[in-house]
Image (spheres, helix red, strand yellow):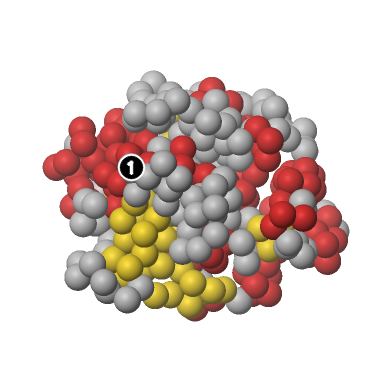
Amino acid sequence: PEKIILDCDPGHDDALALMMAVASTQIKLLGVTTSAGNQTPDKTLNNALRMLTLLGTTDVPVAGGNHRPLMRNLKIADYVHGETGLDGADLPEPTFEPVDQPAVELIADILHSQIEPITLVVTGPMTNIALFLRIHPELKNKIKQIVFMGGAAGQGNVHPTTEFNMAVDPEAAKIVVNEGIPLVMAGLNVTLKAQICSDDLERMRKINNQVAQAITGQMEFYGKWYGQDEFGLAGTPVHDPCTIAYLLKPAIFETHTAYLDVETQGQLTAGETIVDFAGLMNRKPNAKVLMNLDRQRFVDLIIDLLHQFD
Ligand code: BDR
Ligand code: CA
């Protein structure tokens, strides 16, 4: 199996990604760290613990991360994810505690304990990972790749060209993408196509286990915001699961290899991801950018994994 650490800010689509990572035998989840993002850090941490309790995986170490972006005030997305950050289903109270160390130190301990480099999956703002790389540069070579949801090679979702995770902490993202670690970017240009439509929700609703029921309730809540006309979408885009789907079934995706950087200065563009498709910057490509996906196979994968909890 692919060994991963998941750094997330659950968050509905983060919760779905977490479910997939736990359900698949092709992935070994070594740790979960949480970031401030969709909601305040106390809530995203609690949501990770509640989801893992629901999933029956209480032996994975979980650590809470930094409380705010490196240089900016935290902006949350409660208008998408609700008061708890994961509204729409009754989740159990956590039956286990986070570890007694911050996210950065849990990541360090896990990487230390590994002989081979492992994959970091990031589905929230990159604050924890940037801090980790600054505090523990000696462990950089233990990171095989960073597969992240963030950015957009095209339209944004918080500003015309900026995506939420990158916009929350542009400086952190800039640090992370410039470390020379192989990157896989699942940006809005692909994740807006990773939609769950009403027929798919119907299939999910019929799966007779607690996990599927909770996820279906969450998706119904989360779908309301993306159902608004400004996006003109047929279904609900589930961004973060594209990272796990890429690890499990890379053939579902079309990719383009390019140089990637992040804008931090622009008044209209702070947090914009710059993907140099034409090689105009003459820089060595550092990222595999997911461009397109086979939506039906993506949805089928999610449904298959939900059945693991039958
Ligand atoms: C990203 O922002 C968050 O609201 C989602 O969880 C996802 O990671 C999409 O822009
Ligand atoms: Ca997220």
Residue at 58 percent across and 55 percent down: it is 239
Residue at 35 percent across and 73 percent down: it is 277
Q: Position of residue 174 (x, y in %)?
A: 30, 46
Residue at 16 percent across and 41 percent down: it is 137
The quarter of the displayed image where residue 296 is located: bottom right
Direction from residue 186 to residue 309 in the image, left or right:
right
User: Which image quadrant: the C terminus?
Assistant: bottom right
Q: Is residue 261 visible?
A: yes
Q: Position of residue 279 (x, y in %)?
A: 27, 74
Q: Position of residue 188 (x, y in %)?
A: 54, 59
Residue furthest to the left in view is: 138
User: Which image quadrant: the N terminus?
Assistant: bottom left
Residue furthest to the front in view is: 267
Residue at 54 percent across and 66 percent down: it is 190
User: Pointer 1: what residue?
Assistant: 265
Q: Nearer the viewer, residue 22 or 129?
A: 129
Q: Nearer the viewer, residue 146 or 52?
A: 146
Direction from residue 111 to residue 146 in the image, left or right:
right
Q: Amino acid at mark 1?
A: Gln
